[in-house]
Image: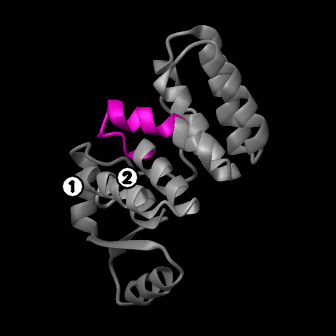
């Protein structure tokens, strides 16, 4: 979790230390800096929450694949990873799609099916070495299978592209 602290009083310093001790990434910013960023449109202030599980699903070309991928995303977001994997597999069976393959690989890695996750993530990373999600999925699956040299290469590729991404740095 990323916590923005608006430095307004000494009390917030204690809050920052407590949040950091619990594992949150704390970034200090003055109120003036925060307001300038918001006015410039560089950040949007919201109420937090979790990211959209279906972000990017509109890039799937086939309508049927898109619907199955959207259903898979909703199932995964609600803790039904096994059912999500089934829907992603159905979508992928209709034709190759990098978005669906990436979502399926990530879901399968979370379920402990690392061989299949590697099988799906490897071509994605080979096709686009800037695909951080594929590199992280591949790296974590390789770590789980104790294939250390390949895991190091995959995770280093992810770090080169996105060195400050918590998913890359923390797995």
For the residue pair 12 and 138, the one nearer the viewer reads as 138
The residue tagged 1 is 36
The image shows residue 80 at horizontal and vertical percentages of 77, 43
- Residue at screen point 37% across, 46% down: 132
Q: In the structure shown, which secondary structural element does the residue marked by tag 2 occupy?
A: helix
Image: 1 above or below 93: below
Give the answer, above or below, for where 21 lies relative to 132: below
Q: Is residue 11 left or right of residue 161?
A: right
Q: Which structural element holds mark 1?
A: helix
Label 1 vs label 2, nearer the camera? 2
Is residue 108 located in the magenta-colored stretch of the structure? Answer: no
Q: Nearer the viewer, residue 101 or 33?
A: 101
Task: Give the vertical position of 89 relative to 96 (above or below).
Answer: below
Region in magenta: 120-133
160 with respect to 90 (left or right): left
How many marks do you count on the picture?
Answer: 2
The percent position of residue 109, horizontal first and vertical second, equals 61, 49
N-terminal label among 1 and 2: 1
Whether residue 73 is situated above or below residue 24 in the rendered picture: above
Q: x, y percentage for residue 1?
A: 49, 64
What's the residue at 39%, 73% (across, down)? 26
Question: Which x, y percent locates residue 8?
Answer: 32, 79
Cα separation between marks 1 and 2? 38 Å
Nearest the eye: 110 or 166? 110
Q: Which residue is mark 2?
A: 154
Q: Residues within 10 Å of mark 1 (few under 14, many from 20)?
A: few
Q: Is residue 27 visible?
A: yes
């Amino acid at each position: 979790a990323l916590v923005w602290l608006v430095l307004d009083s000494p009390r917030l310093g204690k809050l920052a230390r407590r949040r950091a001790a619990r594992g949150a990434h704390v970034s200090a910013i003055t109120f003036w800096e925060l307001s300038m960023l918001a006015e410039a449109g560089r950040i949007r202030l919201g109420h937090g929450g979790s990211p959209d599980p279906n972000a990017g699903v509109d890039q799937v070309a086939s309508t049927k694949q898109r619907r199955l991928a959207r259903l898979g995303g909703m199932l995964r977001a609600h803790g039904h990873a096994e059912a999500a994997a089934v829907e992603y597999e159905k979508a992928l069976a209709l034709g190759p799609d990098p978005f669906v393959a990436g979502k399926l690989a990530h879901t399968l890695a979370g379920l402990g099916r690392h061989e299949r996750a590697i099988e799906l993530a490897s071509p994605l990373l080979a096709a686009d070495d800037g695909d951080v999600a594929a590199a992280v999925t591949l790296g974590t699956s390789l770590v789980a299978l104790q294939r250390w040299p390949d895991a190091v290469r995959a995770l280093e590729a992810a770090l080169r592209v996105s060195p400050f991404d918590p998913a890359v740095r923390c797995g």
